[in-house]
Amino acid sequence: MKRAIGFIDSGVGGLTVVKEVLKQLPHEQIYYLGDTARCPYGPRDRDEVNQFTWEMTNFLVERNIKMLVIACNTATAAALADIRATLDIPVIGVIQPGSRAALKATRNNRVGVLGTIGTVQSMAYPKALKGLNRRVEVDSLACPKFVSVVESGEYKSAIAKKIVAESLLPLKSTKIDTIILGCTHYPLLKTLIENFMGSDVAVINSGEETASEVSALLDYHDLLDRDDNGVQHRFFTTGSVSIFQDIAQDWLDIPDMHVEHIKLGNEKGVYQ
Ligand code: DGL
């Protein structure tokens, strides 16, 4: 029996990480859970995000996943250490890989971080970046409007372009040469962000580096799948199946994708 890699996020954002994993590891089976009904996690307090992240984790652990990817920066900041210390399968987040990728890209050690309010307040990126290179200078910016633009499927619209320009204006006057998309929803806005910041600024999607880490860890634990026989990806959402399916299909290009609706805890959110 194949065992899947589990991915969790507050909504569709973690699909940006799944995309990179499927590119590097096409034999792997994916179980993905997006807690869309309670999205966004960004403005919620840390304890609540920790609790929701555990609920998602337990749902996938009950389905016998072999590894967990917390494909959400807000959840990584609130719960990675706790979950990693408790589970007996490998658990990875997206903040350390994103930081590593940014340090590879920067030429002047000035890095910008875009994230949710929760991620920015946690200081998880400055800590991770300075832990790897104490000379790096970090400008963090919370972009609370981005997640709803993505979840509503409006990420290619003129409104999205306007919101990106208004939100990123404070970074235009800094000397950063690299920006980390410190929320897994943001890669869906990557083209708009690149166009606004200009070609001198490298825009980092942590998905690629996270996928390399998934690959290395699976190999280390001898858990890699050697063929794609019997692969059946499963996608679960606590919110609207049709909206999730539209975005996932646009982004992942998986034929015959089947999305299942599930319930977790006591759901109270915007995208029911
Ligand atoms: N995708 C998430 C992240 O990486 C969270 C978005 C949200 O729910 O606010 O932080």
Image (tube, helix red, strand yellow):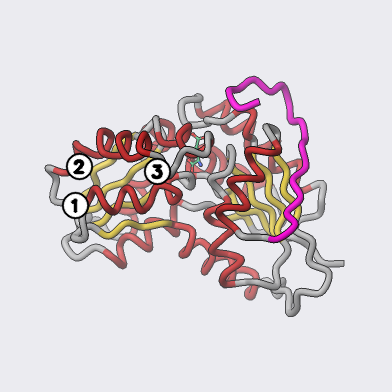
Q: Secondary structure at mark 3?
A: helix
Q: CA distance from mark 3 to mark 1?
A: 18 Å
Disc 3 designates what residue? 124
* Residue 59 image position (x, y, % from top left): 76, 41
Disc 1 designates what residue? 176
Say few, some or many: other residues with alpha carbon within 10 Å of mark 2 (under 14 / 14 to 19 / 20 or more): some
Say few, some or many: other residues with alpha carbon within 10 Å of mark 3 (under 14 / 14 to 19 / 20 or more): some
Q: Which quadrant of the structure image shows residue 252? A: bottom right
Q: Amino acid at mark 1?
A: Ile
Q: Secondary structure at mark 2?
A: helix
Q: Which residues are magenta?
A: 255-272
Which of the pair 74/32 is nearer the observer?
32
Residue in the picture at 45% in, 35% down = 149
Sequence-wise, which precedes: disc 2 or disc 3? 3
Residue 177 is left or right of residue 185, and the answer is left
In front: label 3 or label 1: 1
Q: Which part of the image, by quadrant, shows the C terminus?
A: top right
Sequence-wise, which precedes: disc 3 or disc 1? 3
The answer to whether the residues at label 2 and label 1 have Cβ atoms under 8 Å apart is yes
